[in-house]
Image (tube, rainbow, N blue to C red):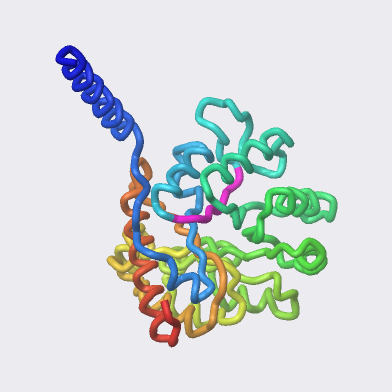
Amino acid sequence: MKHLIPMMAAAALLFVAAMAGAAATSTPAAKPGSDAGAEKLGWRLGCQAYSFNKFSFFEAVDKTVLTGCKYVEAYPGQKLTKDGSTPGTFDSNMSEAAQTAVKKKLADAGIKLTNFGVTGIPGDEAGARKVFDFAKKMGIETIVSEPDPKQFALLDKLTEEYGINVAIHNHPKPSPFWDPDIMLKALQGHSKRIGACADTGHWVRSGLNPLECLKKLEGHIISLHFKDLNKMAGDGHDVPWGTGASNAKAMLAELKRQNFKGVFSIEYEYNWDNSVPDITKCVEFFNATSADLAKQGGCTL
């Protein structure tokens, strides 16, 4: 028995060391607070994979988990895996095998793919159908694009047939939809499934007030690339939500007033090599603000 005690102690020390080593090799998931308020409001928060464009899509999914988000928006052209174990890039030309691998990666991570963009949609029906067929297979709810208004009649047909939205994105001036007034004119008379992907940061870069732009697009917003910039200027850059000049809290309050239901994508275009800590702060702000707004609306959390 005397000989067993040192042996047991040594075994215990080895076990503790092994556990410590395992902990050191894995980064714990963030705990940015409950999203119960957002759920009450009908809001879902995800990462736009472009925030991690220096990495592969699979790595972007892992980073999305670390931020505490449950959803992701893919963008075209991102390499699928760092080591090439799943070859190709994220786009409508992905092989069946690659699509299966992506779905498994998302399921294993507990992440839902909601949106895809900003992507082109061909003007011919056969080409457009290829994009919609791909979106259907991948479970994508919304295709984010900047199509020619001449395509809208075809998109009326396809969005209704497939049950998939098209959200029109606004890159900065002089892109086609930089001004919400231009977008409203283009949307007039078309399907409710065609609406806006409101990029609040690009409005700032175009010299517009993002809060006023959201007000103009009431009833037409399908999803958002939500941003808070450090200054109201064309060269402003992303900062954690609530710390910038874009009045993020007022924008969220306005979206609640509009009874907006849908997806917010965090497209964080700064600190490219290590943006997870900043994005996690965005998630914390979003969850805390959503909880406050839900309470103001009489919701019980």
Is 73 included in the stretch rendered in magenta?
yes
Q: In this view, does 275 lie above or below 153?
A: above
- In this picture, residue 34 sits left or right of residue 263: left
- Observer-nearest of 103 and 162: 103
Q: Is residue 243 above or below residue 19?
A: below
Q: Is residue 122 above or below residue 1?
A: below
Q: Which residue is drawn at 45% across and 58% down?
A: 266
Residue at far right of view: 126
Residue at far top of view: 3
Quarter that holds the C terminus: bottom left
Q: Residue at x 53, y 49 (%)?
A: 110
Residue 273's spot in the image, x, y percent?
Answer: 36, 41
Residue at far front of view: 1
What residue range appears in magenta? Answer: 69-76
The image quadrant that residue 281 belongs to is bottom left
- Observer-nearest of 20 and 141: 20
The image quadrant that residue 52 belongs to is top left
Q: Residue at x 51, y 65 (%)?
A: 44
Residue 207's spot in the image, x, y percent?
Answer: 42, 71
Q: Is residue 112 above or below residue 85?
A: below
| Residue 151 appears in view | no
- How many numbered discs sit on the rendered protein? 0
- In this picture, residue 229 sits left or right of residue 154: left
- Observer-nearest of 226 and 97: 97
Q: Which residue is drawn at 53% across and 40% down?
A: 57
Residue 83's spot in the image, x, y percent?
Answer: 52, 25
| Residue 81 appears in view | yes
Is 29 included in the stretch rendered in magenta?
no
Quarter that holds the N terminus: top left
